[in-house]
Amino acid sequence: MGKSLILLGLLLVGLGLLISAGVPLGRLPGDITIRRGNSVIYLPIVTCLVISLVLSVVLSLFRR
């Protein structure tokens, strides 16, 4: 449990550093935005794929 919390904390710090550095996380090409009248639907498909890939690589490195 302790290692998982440390890993989660490090991931959050890394994500915070990326966002503060200006990386457009959440606005990648391939993310879909639908605007109809006063409503907006945002589908971050590519962002979810990138985050999933990065987390899979990081977690596979920690499991070894």
Image: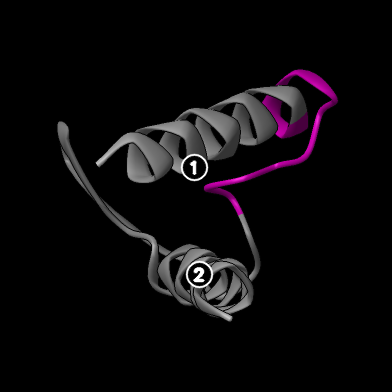
Q: Earlier in the sequence, mark 1 or mark 2?
A: 1
**Mark 1, residue position:** 7
In magenta, the rendered stretch is: 18-27
Label 2: which secondary element: helix
The residue at 48%/28% (across/down) is 9
Name the amino acid, label 2. Answer: Leu
Q: Is residue 25 above or below residue 21?
A: below
21 is within the stretch colored magenta: yes
Whole-percent x and y of residue 31?
48, 66
Label 1: which secondary element: helix
Whole-percent x and y of residue 57?
61, 77
28 is within the stretch colored magenta: no
The residue at 39%/73% (across/down) is 45
**Mark 2, residue position:** 59
Name the amino acid, label 1. Answer: Leu
Position of the C terminus, as image quadrant, is bottom right
Is the residue under label 2 in contact with that under label 1 (CB below 8 Å)? Answer: yes
- Left/right of residue 38 with respect to residue 59 in the rendered view: left
What secondary structure is the magenta-colored segment mainly?
loop
Q: Nearer the viewer, residue 46 or 58?
A: 58
Q: Residues within 10 Å of mark 1 (few under 14, many from 20)?
A: some
Q: Is residue 4 above or below residue 19?
A: below
The residue at 24%/42% (across/down) is 1
Q: Is residue 45 above or below residue 36?
A: below
The residue at 45%/72% (across/down) is 52
Q: Is residue 48 above or below residue 14?
A: below
Whole-percent x and y of residue 10?
59, 33
